[in-house]
Image (spheres, grey):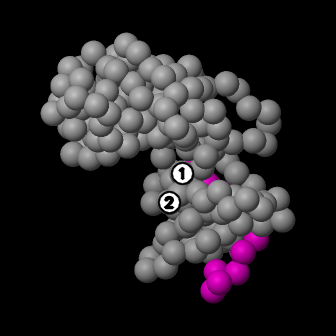
Amino acid sequence: MPDQAPPEWMEVGRVAGTYGVRGWLRIQPYTTKSETILDYQPWRVRQRSGAVKTPTVLEAQVHGKGLIVRIAECEVREEAEHWTGGTIECPISALPALPAGEYYWGELLGLMVETVEGVVLGPVHRLLETGANDVLVVRGGDRERLIPYIPAVVRGIDKDARRMIVDWDPDF
């Protein structure tokens, strides 16, 4: 796989469904506090079809563990249904800077994972929050590996080269 440029946009949530009959959307943010996702503008929504649209958020409120939002592009439930299942992305430049050595989950997605011996395991497909530590889900070939995201295992990350080095047995 050739080196890729670091992404300029990062996934920060998803459109979980519709809310009511006036075109509101239920949003599942990937942020620690639900309302924080509203600070990361502009949004673009990558729909299941692959189309990318840029919504204009008019109103929002916390609803359960997520948010409900009204966007200018939806006035009725039927219009909102077309947005359901889409992923919400924002420019990485809209996110607060992190201290050196810390990364947003979205920055890790797609990084090519290889062992300290140079064995390529595959790209980071997603991350899991387990309570004790986060876990990288790495898919390569016909396997899926669950690799703990801890300093003893993750030895280096090069965002520019889109690569992560891990101390991990490739047979595990």
Q: Residue furthest bottom?
A: 171
Per the rendering, the mark at residue 44 is none
Q: Residues within 10 Å of mark 1 (few under 14, many from 20)?
A: many
Label 1 with label 2: CB-CB less than 8 Å: yes
Query: Which of the pair 9/88 is nearer the observer?
Result: 88
Q: Is residue 135 magenta?
A: no
Distance from disc 1 to disc 2, alpha carbons, whole Å, reads: 6 Å
The image position of residue 91, as x and y in percent, is 50, 26
User: Would you identify the image quadrant in which residue 45 lies?
Assistant: top left
Q: Bounds of the magenta span?
A: 162-172
Total number of numbered discs in the rendering: 2
Per the rendering, the mark at residue 109 is 1
Labels 1 and 2: the sequence-earlier one: 1
The reply, left or right, for residue 22 in relation to residue 92 is left
The image position of residue 70, as x and y in percent, is 34, 21
Main SS, magenta residues = loop
Is the residue 70 above or below the residue 131 in the image? Answer: above
Residue 147 seen in the current view: yes
What residue type is disc 1 on?
Answer: Leu
Query: Which of the pair 9/128 is nearer the observer?
Result: 128
Per the rendering, the mark at residue 125 is 2
Tell me which residue sits at (51%, 75%) in the image: 144
Tell me which residue sits at (77%, 66%) in the image: 153
The reply, left or right, for residue 62 in relation to residue 75 is right
What residue type is disc 2 on?
Answer: His
The reply, left or right, for residue 46 in relation to residue 8 is left
Q: In what quadrant of the picture does the C terminus appear?
A: bottom right
The reply, left or right, for residue 31 in relation to residue 88 is right
